[in-house]
Amino acid sequence: MKYSKIDKQLFKDNRQRLAANMEPQSVAILFSNDVMPRGGDQTYAFHQHADLFYLSGIDQADTILALCPQHENPALREVLFITENNEHSKIWTGNKYSKEESREISGISTVYWCSEAEKILRELILSSKTIYFDLPENKAYVPQVTTNNERQAAYYRSLYPLHNYARLAPIMEQLRVQKSSIELQLLQQACKITGDTFKDLLTQVHADMGEYEIEGRITNGFLSRRATCHSFHPIVASGKNACILHYEDNHDICQDGDLLLLDMGAEYAHYAGDLSRTIPINSKFSPRQKQIYEACLEVFNYAKTLYVPGMSINKIHRLTLQKMQEQLLKIDLIKQQDIEQEVVKYDSVRKYFMHGTAHFVGLDVHDVGGKDTVLDYGMVLSCEPGIYVAEEGIGIRIETMMQVNDHPIDMMADVPSTVQEIESIMQK
């Protein structure tokens, strides 16, 4: 793997926490993600199922994890199944994990080949009353492709129709939303790679560069610093493109006098970074660009103070909208009359700031956790106010990752954010 070895205590602790939340006489069975075909004899880069990685650290396809905490045989309380190497796979795709390597990575003593899974899983299931399967339950997204976990759950339901079946996703959300010290270190490394790559860009961006060229430099910056990959497709949006919230084409040429909105994140050991900054392509903000940018920065600095225990995403957003309203009034984007005529509170603000302020970040860049989840120590979220003025061709977003604390921790505090800092570095 590109990333350094992770302390297996992380995965052992995660399994213990899950076991403590499972019903008596139950088994949880998790399957790795599919290898997805791209065309011809190609596949997309494999990306492990987040919960399976969280519980085992195993980062390859054709993996099964079974947890049966109360099984009478201690050797069968944690069981890992991996794919068996053969001479053909060694030549064409390289070695897979050996059983010993899998034990060392995961901390699981009992490891079988996948070819033995049917027999062992039958024993675990017949000793249990309840079976947990890990089906996708993202509140904002329904996948169009059936996952391996969904197919396997349907298969085992057909074999064992009289068992009780339970949802693993709500338990995993409860566990994953609060990060351990090891996870915070991994997230901090993702933040560092992301931030250092952005700092490089400040000395490289100039007029007449292609957005695609900047995307290439982001990729190079990430991979040269041992990132696994991008945590999401980077947004490199110059000029009016910055007013398209999920602009991903990255195919235009940067024009002198325009702004460049960068939304980028490195993934390190499956943990996501997420950073946004907006910079002047010619290294100097115009008076109007500076006015709008500093209004957004004022909101950004205020919003960062809100990431304290007891808050929630919805509470943070409501207070941020209020602060944004004050700033939009100051820079004459809205008027008091607009506010008085609103049918729904803050509608006039949402014309220029139409997305949320925060989302959880972890093994996914939009990680598990709800908008009303009560924030607690060790949770990590984005902070990302923006102002988008399509009629002026100006789109600004400033984003960092915040760790919830009595005094909230900006995990990218060393990344330039003020007009002076950005201009000073770019003009060098």
Image (cartoon, helix red, strand yellow):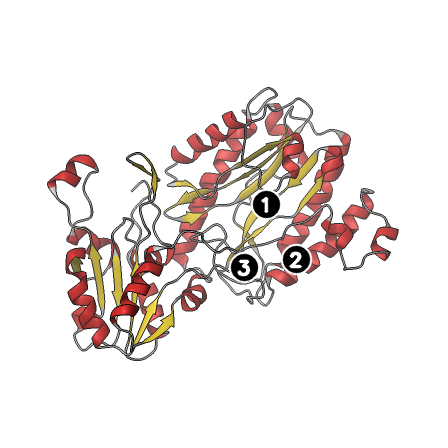
Residue highlighted by disc 1: 399
Q: Earlier in the sequence, mark 1 or mark 3?
A: 1
Q: Is residue 332 above or below residue 325?
A: above
Residue at 51% x, 27% y: name it. Answer: 212
Residue at 74% x, 47% y: name it. Answer: 351
Residue at 71% x, 33% y: name it. Answer: 393
Q: Are marks 2 and 1 in contact (CB under 8 Å)?
A: no
Please name the amino acid that badge 2 sits on: His
Q: Residue furthest right?
A: 337
Q: Earlier in the sequence, mark 2 or mark 3?
A: 2
Please name the amino acid that badge 1 sits on: Glu
The spot of residue 131 in percent (x, y) is 31, 72
**Nearer to us: label 2 or label 1:** 2
In front of the other: 403 or 261: 261
Residue density around tag 3, few if under 14, some if 14–19, many if 20 or more, within 10 Å = many
- The mark found on residue 153 in the picture is none
The spot of residue 209 in percent (x, y) is 56, 22
Q: What SS does tag 3 mark?
A: loop
Q: CA distance from mark 2 to mark 3?
A: 15 Å
Please name the amino acid that badge 3 sits on: Val
Q: Are marks 1 and 3 in contact (CB under 8 Å)?
A: no
Q: CA distance from mark 2 to mark 1?
A: 14 Å
Residue highlighted by disc 3: 404
